[in-house]
Amino acid sequence: MRLVDLTAPITQSPPETPEPLRTDIVFQDHAEGAGQIEALLGVPARLLRDGEGWATETFTHFGTHSSTHVDAPWHYNSKIDGQPAETIERLPLEWFFSDGVVLDMTAKGDGEEIDVADVEGELRRIGHELAELDIVLVRTGRDAHYGEPSYMALGPGVTLAATRWLYERGVRVMGIDAWGWDAPLYMQAQEALERDEPGVFWAAHQADLPYSQIERLVNLDQLPATGFKVACFPLRIVGGSAAPARVVAILEG
């Protein structure tokens, strides 16, 4: 069995990162841990191995969408198909451990559409017929720029029609190695303003479908098109619109 980590590392954000997108981590070392132990329990450092206590870390700023994460329907809208949208802890675990499929869309340019014909064509090329609860991962190659300031502005976008097409074939979890499932936000915003109509900005997110996206994956180039499992269990954040997940591909042999 071989494991491939599809999860981006969680690191301290550079100083220039805008606050809504930041990850800030405070690291407490073993000396600080020894001081905490003495303060809490009265045990001095001389009674600890090498005079050291526990090392700990504290997130002082970390959004549920700030790393490789799984989106819940609640992220997209308050209601889906006329019913209250489900938050992340309410989704069935069965969604998050299933057969994986990689669709190679690396030829697509930034902002270019990944539409139904593209998905159908790639499935024909790899000889795969979608099964219920397949986890479909879209490889764009933009993970090469993960951590760079430009990453947010890169990537093609999966269309509303393609998202609905996957859903109708039983897919409930869809992932991508770009910043988002739709095209880059600034491109969507420009088109929505020019057309002055709803349904343009965030179209695939707001598809009125109860499905999950995995965004900001890495290492999809290390996977075959099919023949592997994906484990992508999100943290159980009650009421959450999303949750970080350790996404791992499991290959036999």
Image (tube, grey):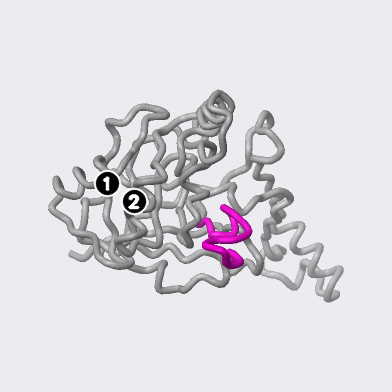
Mark 1 neighbour class, 10 Å CA radius: few under 14, some 14 to 19, many 20 or more: many
Q: Residue at x 59, y 47 (%)?
A: 66
Q: Is residue 40 left or right of residue 83?
A: right
Q: Are marks 2 and 1 in contact (CB under 8 Å)?
A: yes
Q: Which label number is shown at residue 137? A: 2
Q: Residue at x 86, y 68 (%)?
A: 39
Question: Which quarter of the figure is the N terminus placed in?
Answer: bottom left
Closer to us: 91 or 117: 117
Q: Is residue 216 left or right of residue 125?
A: right
* Residue 232 image offset from top left, x and y in percent: 43, 62
Of the numbered discs 2 and 1, the one sitting upstream in the chain is 1
Q: Determine the CA span between mark 2 and mark 1.
A: 6 Å
Report which residue position mark 1 lands on. Answer: 103
Q: Which residues are magenta?
A: 70-86
Residue 80 among those drawn in magenta: yes
- Residue 215 vertical placement versus 114 (above, below): below
Closer to us: 84 or 56: 84
* Residue 124 image offset from top left, x and y in percent: 15, 48
Mark 2 neighbour class, 10 Å CA radius: few under 14, some 14 to 19, many 20 or more: many
Q: Is residue 224 left or right of residue 181?
A: left
